[in-house]
Image (spheres, rainbow, N blue to C red):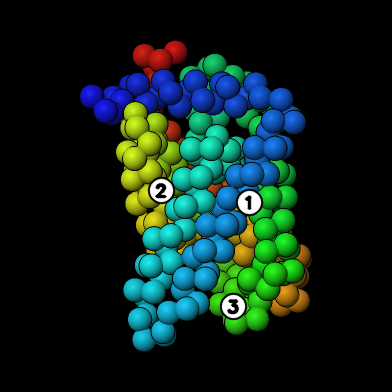
Amino acid sequence: MSLHTPKEIAQLAIQSGVAKSRAPVSILLILGFMAGAFIATGFLLDLHVINTLPAEWGSFGGLLGAAVFPVGIIMTVLAGGELLTGNMMTLPVAWFARRISFMSVARNWFWVTLANFLGSVAVAWFFGHMLGMTEGDYLKKTVAIASAKVHADFLHAFISGIGCNWLVCLAVWLAFASKDVVGKIFGMWFPVMAFVAIGFQHVVANMFIIPAAIFAGQMSWAEYFPNFIAVFSGNAVGGAVFVWSGLFPCIPPCR
């Protein structure tokens, strides 16, 4: 078969969580930086697609933008990057299976969050600001997207974060399911496209689009911080709890 069974996928997720928990800080920083940059690049591509479409296309334009966003997560997973939202599933699953400690989860999340932020902000600054790829003709759309995110109240941003990472981690689950590259790409593509088209909030994607608006002088870091807390928390619940509930029946045989 070209697919792993659910129990095999659970085993792979646990093994991944264990390996990530043992990775040196230097590796987490390098791979985390790359993952943040990849996600930001996917969002930048999305922004450029939707900005060139006529307004009359309405939500169909958003769907086309969502269709190209998964490039970032595909590059991250296939290249072996460390992405916070994916680690919000694999590390807790390994912890629930009693293979790692909670401190190992917290350690990984801390360093990967920092690295993802640096990678995303680097793309926002160098590509978005210095090259003008999120400003000029693209500024109106950049600010509109960022404003919608930061002006959502805490509860809405939190629930949106849950929905987002439920789908993102299901994309990672489907990547584990396939044994070949093409299957992994298709498995990841549609859940990620769905969360973007729906408009759910992804903490790492926000690390790109909101700083891009900040660098353009359209909002402040103080406006960003509450959004970060709300979306981070929602993403953590979506990955660690919602996906885990589906994995739980598969975990005991893997202990």
Outermost residue toward the left? Answer: 1
Q: Do the residues bearing badges 3 and 1 touch, measured as CB atoms within 8 Å?
A: no
Is residue 7 shown to the viewer in this render?
yes
User: What secondary structure is found at the residue carrying circle 1?
Assistant: helix
**Side (left or right) of 146 relative to 7:** right
The numbered mark at residue 167 is 2
Q: Secondary structure at mark 2?
A: helix
Distance of label 3 from label 1 (alpha carbons)? 19 Å
**Circle 2 crowding by C-alpha within 10 Å: few under 14, some 14–19, many from 20:** many
Question: What residue is drawn where x is 67% and y is 67%?
Answer: 128
- For marks 1 and 2, give the CA distance: 20 Å
Q: Quadrant of the N terminus?
A: top left
The residue mark sitting in front, 3 or 2, is 3
Which residue lies under the disc numbered 1?
37
**Vertically, is 130 above or below 91?**
below
Q: List the residue tagged with mark 3.
A: 138
Q: In the drawing, what numbered circle is on residue 237? A: none
Q: Is residue 175 left or right of residue 32?
A: left
Cα gap from disc 3 to disc 2, whole angstroms: 28 Å
Residue 4 is drawn in which quadrant? top left
Q: Is residue 106 visible?
A: no
